[in-house]
Amino acid sequence: MSDLTNDEGFVTGSVNNLTNYYTKTEVDALAAGSGTNALVFETKAALDVWLEEQNNVTNLKAGQNIYIKAADTPDYWWDGTGLQPLETEKVSLDGYVTDAQLTTKLTDYLRNTDKETENIDFSTYFAG
């Protein structure tokens, strides 16, 4: 018993029954989807692990969106009994270059076009 007058609902020591508590994964998923009722996971594998917990599946609502941060993985929605892929078009980045590719091309160009710059390391000039 503590000095508080109404402390019966507070955790004051060790907890033996975690039935009414959320796991870290559940809290992260709830926080990521707060306000939108959507869930967000880093990978499909992380979602699959989360779905292994029956309590998580029970709390899903039909129509709820589940987003995967990994760009090469589709997003999903819950149809009430299982996952369905969201029918959204992934953005194609074909024809674009990465920062590393651009740095390499520019460095190679500068080295190959000017003898005075052939021994200079330009990588730090292009760092974002």
Image: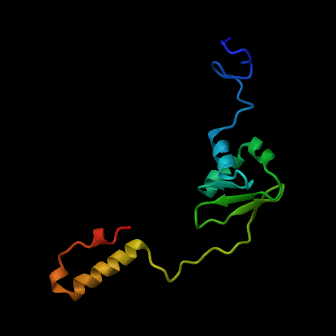
Residue farthest along the bottom direction in this orientation = 113
Residue shown at 69% from the left, 47% from the top? 30
Q: Nearer the viewer, residue 45 or 7?
A: 7
Question: Vertical placement of 23 versus 107: above or below?
Answer: above
- Specify the color scheme: rainbow
Locate the C terminus by quadrant. bottom left
At x 70%, y 33%, the residue is 21
Residue 125's spot in the image, x, y percent? 29, 71
Residue at x-position 65% and y-position 51%: 32
Q: Quadrant of residue 103?
A: bottom left
Where is residue 83 shown, x and y percent of the image? Answer: 76, 59
Furthest residue in direction left, as rendered: 116
At horizontal 58% and vertical 62% (from top left) the residue drawn is 70
Write down the quadrant of residue 43 in the picture.
bottom right
Decide: is 96 above or below 46.
below
Observer-nearest of 9 and 114 = 9
**Residue 68's quadrant in the figure?**
bottom right
Q: Position of residue 126 (x, y in %)?
A: 33, 72
Quarter of the figure that contains the N terminus: top right
| Total labels drawn | 0
Q: Residue 15: x percent and y percent?
A: 66, 23
Drawn side of residue 24 relative to residue 118, left or right: right
Q: Is residue 69 left or right of residue 128?
A: right
